[in-house]
């Protein structure tokens, strides 16, 4: 049971980090004009990806452009992606 809680905590940690990064991306308004800025944008979107994916999935279901199976597939992918980010963040936090 403790392992399940650890997995859920890692998913929540990853999704939180993703949401923070996505909102910083929106607030700061990155312009991808140079090569280095495009690389920075790609790195930011690797971390912000789960939040952006879930946001697009929810808006797609509400607009009736997505079927429910597509939504749940995207949600499962975002959860797995958040797990990977969360494990990385927790590992870095433990090393501090």
Image (cartoon, rainbow, N blue to C red):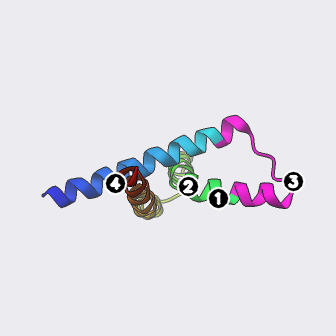
Question: Magenta stretch containing residue 94, yes or no?
Answer: no
In the rendered image, residue 41, in percent from the top left (x then y), is placed at: 71, 54
Tell me the distance, in whole angstroms, between the alpha carbons under discs 3 and 4. Answer: 34 Å
Tell me the distance, in whole angstroms, between the alpha carbons under discs 3 and 2. Answer: 20 Å
Q: Is residue 55 above or below residue 49?
A: above
Question: Magenta stretch containing residue 33, yes or no?
Answer: yes
In the rendered image, residue 47, in percent from the top left (x then y), is placed at: 55, 55
Tag 2's secondary structure?
helix
Q: Which residues are magenta?
A: 25-41
Relative to 40, 44 lies left or right = left
Q: Is residue 71 above or below residue 31?
A: below
Query: What residue would you read off at disc 4?
Result: 10
Tell me the distance, in whole angstroms, between the alpha carbons under discs 1 and 2. Answer: 7 Å
In the rendered image, residue 23, in percent from the top left (x then y), is placed at: 60, 39
Tell me the residue at 38%/54% (across/down): 95
Tag 1's secondary structure?
helix
Relative to 65, 91 lies left or right = left
Tag 4's secondary structure?
helix
Of the numbered discs 1 and 3, the one sitting upstream in the chain is 3
Of the numbered discs 3 and 4, the one sitting upstream in the chain is 4
Query: What residue would you read off at disc 3?
Result: 33
Tag 3's secondary structure?
loop
| Disc ID at residue 43 | 1
Tell me the residue at 47%/61% (across/down): 74
In contact (CB < 8 Å): disc 1 and disc 3: no
Query: What residue would you read off at disc 2?
Result: 47
Of the numbered discs 3 and 2, the one sitting upstream in the chain is 3
């Amino acid at each position: 049971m403790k392992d399940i809680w650890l997995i859920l905590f890692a998913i929540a940690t990853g999704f939180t980090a993703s949401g923070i990064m996505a909102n910083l991306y929106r607030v700061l308004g990155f312009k991808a004009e140079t090569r280095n800025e495009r690389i920075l944008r790609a790195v930011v979107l690797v971390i912000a990806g789960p939040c952006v994916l879930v946001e697009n999935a929810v808006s797609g279901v509400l607009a009736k452009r997505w079927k429910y199976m597509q939504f749940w597939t995207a949600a499962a992918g975002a959860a797995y992606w958040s797990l990977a980010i969360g494990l990385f963040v927790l590992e870095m936090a433990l090393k501090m």
